[in-house]
Image (cartoon, rainbow, N blue to C red):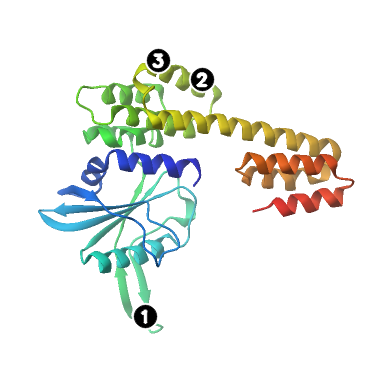
Amino acid sequence: MGQWDGKMKHLANAAPEDFVRWLVEDAHFEGELSPNFASRDRDADALWDISINQVPSLLHTEFQVEPDSNMSRRLWEYNAEASIKYVRPVKSVVIYLKKPGSSEAEPPYQLKLPNGEVVHNFSFSVVELCNLEAEQLFQTGLKGILPLVPLTQGGQQHEAIERVIDELQQPGVKKQEELLSLTYGLAGLVFEDESDHLWLVRRFAMLKDILKESWTFQEIRQEGREEGQLQVQRQNLILLIQARFPALVQLAQGVCNAIQVLEELQDLFQKVLLAKDELEVRQHILSAQK
């Protein structure tokens, strides 16, 4: 999930009350719970203590970017463990940040015996941001979910981003700096046109007095610098391979795009530069493959 993961967890932590009200009818946020279970290979993205009509319950949320054919089962397994541990009913929601494709989780998740008898029937909710109109998020009145607007239909228009900025700058908005920073970060992940990126940078530069104390903004800017260095190193490596061993360009392109650590790209560049023949370069590329 890379850059998405940190931003979404920051957003969920910045505005859990608004996420709860958005995702569960008549629910109120009561507190955060550790999403870690010793029996699980990976933590949930968020686990919240909530109440529905004053009855204690839990909300389990997953943010998903990449296709995962096992998502429905993952939700079921985590839901069951959380319910057993805390002795409460658990609402599970998966939020797709990009179009999920053919691997979208579809409720209900069922386990059946060979004779067709259903022994587990698990319901959960699916939110596909790409299928929501930006206006739907604005109409909720929940400021804490507005950084998600760039991921919705119509949310990448400059007017929509301006409206988010205006809404978040209103008096009384909690964690204003962090929410503005996360709007900038998420918009930067979905804007594809270079002119849109330039507009985004210029627009948020105007908010520097507000954002200068935001540690989230500093982190996002650092991520941007690191991603720029990665892109330059990838381009240099591909150009080197294209010049010396053009038959390996396609193989190298896929491997280079998968490498997210600058030092690993630099190491591969050095090995290719010093390699004696195509066979040696191929071996280095395959060794670097994740």
Badge 3: few (under 14), some or many (20 or more) residues near its Cα, within 10 Å?
Answer: few
- Which residue occupies 74% across, 37% down? 237
Residue 251 image label: none
Q: Amino acid at mark 2?
A: Leu
Q: Nearer the viewer, residue 101 or 281?
A: 281
Residue 118 lies, with reference to residue 273, above or below; the image says below
Q: Amino acid at mark 3?
A: Met
Residue 27 lies, with reference to residue 231, above or below; the image says below
**Left or right: where 277 falls relative to 235:** right
Q: Nearer the viewer, residue 256 or 120?
A: 256
Dot 2 corresponds to which residue? 198
The percent coordinates of residue 218 (x first, y second) are: 44, 28
CA distance separating discs 2 and 3: 13 Å
The percent coordinates of residue 47 (x first, y second) are: 30, 54
Residue projecting furthest to the left: 54
Residue projecting furthest to the right: 276
Dot 1 corresponds to which residue? 116
Query: Mark 1 vs mark 2: which is more N-terminal?
Result: 1
**Left or right: where 250 falls relative to 40:** right
**Left or right: where 52 falls relative to 270:** left
Residue 206 image label: 3
